[in-house]
Image (cartoon, rainbow, N blue to C red):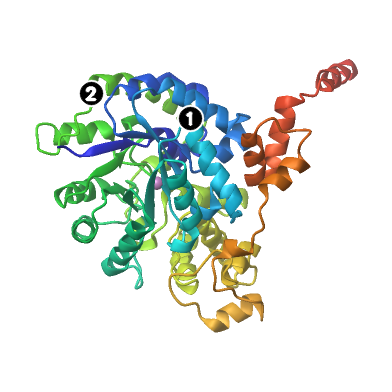
Amino acid sequence: MGIKIVDTALRDGHQSLFATRMTTKEILEVLSDMDNAGYYALEVWGGATFDACLRFLNEDPWERLRLIRKACKKTKLQMLFRGQNILGYKHYPDDIVDKFVEKSLINGIDIIRVFDALNDIRNLEAAVTATKRYGGHCQVAFCYTTSPIHTVDYFVEMAKKIEAMGADSICIKDMSGVLLPEDAYQLVSQLKANTKLPIELHSHCTAGAAHVTYMKAIEAGVDIIDTALSPLSSGTSQPPSETFQYMLQGTKYDPELNLEHLKIAAEKIKKIRDKYLANGLLNPKALSVNPNILQYQVPGGMLSNLMSQLKNQGAIDRYEEVLREVPLVRADLGYPPLVTPLSQMVGTQAVMNVLTGERYKLVPEEIKDYLRGHYGASPGLIDSALRKKIINEDKVIDYRPANDLAPQFEHLKAKYRDLIKTDEDVLSIALFENVAVNFLENKYQPKTEDKTEVFEINLHV
Ligand code: CO
């Protein structure tokens, strides 16, 4: 049997290339062709899509999921789920995690890919338990990164724990595209030798190595690869789906995708991609190869964030300097993998260190919380003098952070009873309170006086 392919264009593709701004209408235009192409699954939800819907697109992310499910009849749907962070940027209580998993599955998701930014397995427990309870396929991903801590043995030990937790499959999540071909061969071989679970590889083309890395992983026995339909592939995104079909066709690895359907879908997505290229949301820089990633270990999404942060500060000329500061901050913090929310936190700290001219003169509250143990255990040790400089004698916890969080669902449901109509609304509020409340007020209680205001202003003109 050939290898399986998960197409990520409709989640990671546009998240990596143009800040997750594809609309539901645009997604629906290509969905039936992708549904007919023979993919193992389509990753279409989770990650930053939920936040982007509410915050930028004025769309209900739950409605998007239901529409996708309706249009996608044959192929499994996958979402990316950040463990105890769900789709947000902090830890949520267990009852919210549980309800979110339940509602994701009810509204159409088949496979939940769950990971923790620190690879702290305690932060996955609630999501894994819920996914199993509600009958979903539970894939646990570990964040691949390189550091003195993150050896093949480290990942094999983690894989054994993932298997023991009851996961259905394991994903190597190489969010920065730093996994090199020979390392992938070793890692996949060792994972296959030490666990029975299917192994999936997720990487990014940022450094230009992913195509070859995928081929070596395939030779080592990887079961599933993540690729993106060509117009939303490459650069900071995944390798192109069609290319892998052409490369593997007729071999024992043949994924058996239907190239005719892929061609039709690609034609449509190309027009959409070109629109974002023309309006500037897709920065051509995101499409080029950046081998320096192998030195800096910065994921694609973080690069575009850093660029826009520096642009806003009028300091785009400090870009290379900030990139050099990132690995130094990361080492100071015990080598956290650079993935949401740690990538933003480390990135912001690096920007502050460079722009203020003094390291850790300004420290975001999130970094302080990290040092207090509120995100989980750091992979490596943190220098105690640095910790003290930043958080003084603040208490540092060594247990699962969510143990401290009281249930919230019923409380939020009662608090917003006049606004919400569904449990899904409560979950949107639980994750992004102000943004979701704004969105729901517009949705359910649209203000009519807006028109009058415009009219009055016109009178003055
Ligand atoms: Co990714």
Residue at left offset 60%, top offset 48%: 96
Q: Position of residue 304 (x, y in %)?
A: 48, 47
Packing grade of label 1 (10 A; few <14, some 14-19, many >=20) is some
Q: Position of residue 374 (x, y in %)?
A: 59, 66
- Classify the position of the C terminus by image quarter: top right
Q: Which mark is residue 176?
A: none
Amino acid type, label 1:
Tyr
Residue at left offset 38%, top offset 58%: 165
Calculate the distance from the C-alpha at mark 2 to the C-alpha at mark 1: 27 Å
Q: Which mark is residue 276?
A: 1
Asked whether mark 1 lies closer than 8 Å to ligand 1, one says no
Work out which residue is located at the far front of the displayed protein and give it.
133
Q: Is residue 174 left or right of residue 197?
A: right
Residue 336 seen = yes
- Classify the position of the N terminus by image quarter: top left
Number of numbered markers: 2
Say which of marks 2 and 1 sits in front.
Answer: 2
Residue in front for this viewpoint, 184 or 240: 184
Amino acid type, label 2:
Asn
Residue 23 seen = no
Residue under label 2: 258
